[in-house]
Amino acid sequence: MKNRWLFVICMIAITLVIALSALLVVRNVKSKEPVISTESPDSEPRVVVWDSQGFTSENVSARPEGEVVSGIPEVSEPVTEPVITSEETSSESGNTQPEEVDLQEYFADSVFVGDSIFVGYRNYLANHKGSPVSGASFLAASSYTSAHALEEDDNLHPIFQGKKQPVWKTISEIGAKRVFLMFGTNDLVVKDGIRASGDVFALIDKIHEENPDVEIVIISMVPVYEDVSKGALNNPTIDIYNYYLLAAAADHNADFIDLNTSLKNEKGNIKDEYCSDNYVHETDKAYQEVWDPILTAYAAGEKKTDEAEMNEQETAVQE
Amino acid sequence: MKKKIATVMIGVLVLAAGITACNGKEKPTASDIPAVSETSEISGAAADVLSTADCYKAIQEKIALPEMYLADDEYIMNYYGIDTAKLSDYTFASCTDPTRTDTVILMELKDEADADEIEACLNLYLEQMEAEMENYNPAANELVKASSVRRNGNRIDLIICEDRESALALADGTSK
């Protein structure tokens, strides 16, 4: 009897010891398991193509070279989230839509030349890689004017890949196919609209001289904050300056894109939510709601024009 | 009988002890040694030096910086002229506001022989900032003038911000 009880106690002890050992083994195994982060991984940025009602690519479809891109309606109800044209986005399907790839390639071949307004856009795109425009190169510097850009040797020429040189040389070296140009913010402080626009066209002619095949697109100067008046820098003068640019663009073989209209309010000043410093610079909201959609719509129209021309040529050859 | 029971118990105890000992601290195997990443801590005698990402994080926590963005490889090549293939660890941060010049650039070079070339790129960038801000934003220009490229062996940094001295101390990256 006594032995039986002793036997039972031993068995219980053995069981406890084995159980304790097993627990220790399991705990050490668990400590080697990879830690699964509770934070959700950053989702892939989605490339989207603006396609809101009343602002379709048909507005900017095939047109003669040099014709003004006009009639772009104001954004009546600003969209806070990007508009997705297809349920299958690149992040969901894993496949990038062909049109999105075309736009990325389009802007990868493009250079933006200008002043601090473009520096701000460049910085915005560095933080928003989902924009099709983010592949573009920038030759932009604060304080830069078209007069500076015309000088062979100027200490404000933007640095690109370690070189500081006139923009027409950099454009040539990187093989850009098109140039988007915006000047005026600093030019109008020291010159009137006529002379400032004259400098822009002189620069366009110089770029074409060195790069005959490059396409040039003039982007309108953007509006400034209400009551801003420094030299000729004020909204009424900006409108006149933009008119000069618009009127002579075709003569210099350049397109013109109007960003100004969509950025300003009914008083003709930049909308509060689009201005970052109560002066001339813009917010991410402006870049997202106005710049990106208008530029990508322009690019989409250009792609259609190119395709239409190629089809015509092929038809002509067949005939 | 008692002897048998005792023997069995001792055997089980020895077995249990062996099992727990084997699953305690194991000797590290090759698979346990973490791969050296580009942002890992510097090994060897400087084992306490933080990565550039950690240094930048410390700077962000202690120094009042404006909204910043981190540059990718293409951006670094295009606008600083630096090939990141020459770097073993790097963080390039710049302010989004085009009217300001706040910059935090921290680098560790793979080969100290590239230091002159990379320092020249950063000096060119400093000259450009000074030229842009001279009449545009004199206050920002003062920060640029107060800055310089700093070199220590294969580590190079350029910091432009208010309270630059504190930022530089944090950029040294020695843990406390």
Image: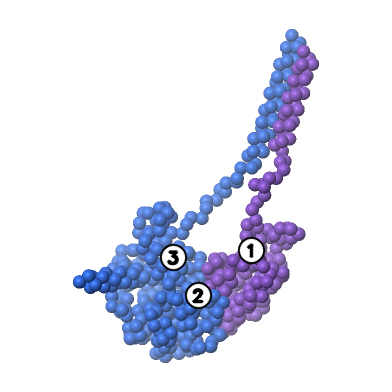
User: Is residue B129 found left or right of A290 in the rendered image?
Assistant: right
Foreground of the two, A176 or A187: A176
User: Is residue A219 found left or right of B89 in the rendered image?
Assistant: left
Report the disc number at residue B88.
1
Chain letter of the residue beneath label 3 in the structure image: A
Note whether residue A189 is visible. Answer: no
Q: Position of residue A124 (x, y in %)?
A: 49, 69
How far, Cα to Cα, is label 2 from label 1?
Answer: 29 Å
Q: Position of residue A115 (x, y in %)?
A: 49, 79
**Image quadrant assignment for residue A295:** bottom left
How far, Cα to Cα, is label 1 from label 3?
Answer: 29 Å
Q: Name the residue rendered at 75%, 15% in the picture.
A: A6
Chain letter of the residue beneath label 2 in the structure image: A
Please state which of the two labelled residues, at mark 1 or mark 3, is closer to the viewer: 1
Chain painted in blue in the figure: A
Q: Position of residue A186 (x, y in %)?
A: 48, 84
Foreground of the two, A192 or A112: A112
Q: Residue furthest right?
A: B3
**Image quadrant assignment for residue A248:** bottom left
Secondary element at image label 3: loop
Secondary element at image label 2: helix
Report the disc number at residue A119.
2
Question: What residue would you read off at disc 3?
Answer: A131
Q: Name the residue rendered at 68%, 66% in the picture.
A: B171
Q: Name the residue rendered at 71%, 36% in the picture.
A: B22
**Image quadrant assignment for residue B20:** top right
Q: Earlier in the sequence, mark 2 or mark 3?
A: 2
**For the residue marked with disc 3, what is the amino acid?**
Ser
**Up-down: is A41 above or below B27?**
below
| Numbered disc total | 3
